[in-house]
Image: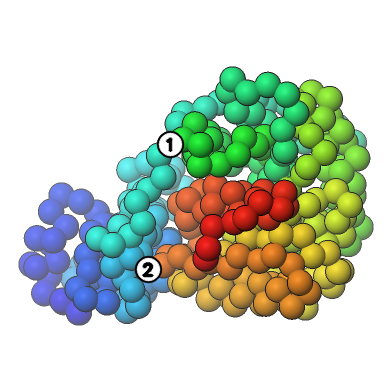
Amino acid sequence: MPRDPDALRARLGDRRLALWAEGHVLHVAYRGPAENPQVVGVDVQLSRVDGDLWAGQMTIERLDEAVFQIFEPTERGELITRDHVHVWRGPLAPPELPYVHVVPADHRLPFLGGERGVHVYRPAGIDGPLPAVCMADGEALQGFAGLVESMIRARDLPPVILVGVESGDNDERAREYLPLDDPERFTAHLGFVVDQVIPWARDTVQASGVWLAAGFSNGAVWALNAAQRRPDVFRGVVALSPGIPPELCAPQTASAPHYIAAGTQERGFRRAAAKWAKTLDERGAAVQHREWIGGHDEYWWRQHLPAGLRFVLKAESGSPSPAP
């Protein structure tokens, strides 16, 4: 690893963070006042080189295919802005999907004595009932909707409605998405989705009777378990970076189509995704299991949602799906 302070400063220029590759090695240099700085988005441990200058490296197989969305270290209380976010892309990484700016409609529905936000994207200019996707962490819906809209316009994805149900705070999110953390709260939240959100979407935005469940991270665990517990409602799943394997979720017997994916640099999530794919495949479900060269990263979740929806909708309808 280059440890020469002058070389690292030259690499940084007037930036606080620099990333570069040499073969399979990803190098990171950082200059700033943070004490014991942590780079979020890639598992590189930084060590002090000189004063406020830090550096680290890690070896990544197929690094030239990788994409990392990286957040540079910040001081305690410092507001994170777009200036802190960097995207490193290998020369052989898949091209980024085109994005169309859309603005989902915002709604609020009663839930457990309060309210919960529900955000809805419906493809522009398409009439009549459409299949719908219930997405966990609905506050993130807009970033996904722009890619879905682009794929629908290009006729690369069947028209579909996205219904994003907001998550609660950190504690509530875990209790509502992880079935064994708080079974009562998980059941109440699932009941809210099935008994309130879905009928409301049918009447309000013409969602048809075909529903999929989708999510990322803990939201992916929710989507998998929602389909296991209510196979009468959810006819397919897109699960991106699920963090808990099936043996810790008390899965039932549903065998709807599943698209399951995770990054090669998110160890536990990668293992859990592979276990889910294997378990569901052994039950006879149509499963497409994919991995990206990257980490636990919203960039990749957005890139994989359209592919996941395409696979699951075709498998659910009985149409032939693209070869793996």
Residue 193 at what x, y percent from top left? Answer: 83, 43
Q: Tell me the mark number nearer the camera, choosing from 2 and 1.
A: 1
| Residue type highlighted by circle 1 | Tyr
Report helix, strand or loop for mark 1.
loop
Q: Are there few (<14), some (14-19), or many (20+) residues within 10 Å of tag 1? A: some
Snapshot colouring: rainbow
Residue 99 shows which numbered tag?
1
Residue 36 shows which numbered tag?
2
| Residue type highlighted by circle 2 | Asn
Q: Is residue 249 visible?
A: yes
Q: Is residue 212 above or below residue 126?
A: below
Q: Residue at (78%, 42%) from the top-left corner?
A: 210
Q: Is residue 243 visible?
A: no
Q: CA distance from mark 2 to mark 1?
A: 36 Å
Q: Nearer the viewer, residue 216 or 36?
A: 216
Q: Residue at (35%, 77%) from the top-left corner?
A: 61
In-image side of 15 versus 257 (left or right): left
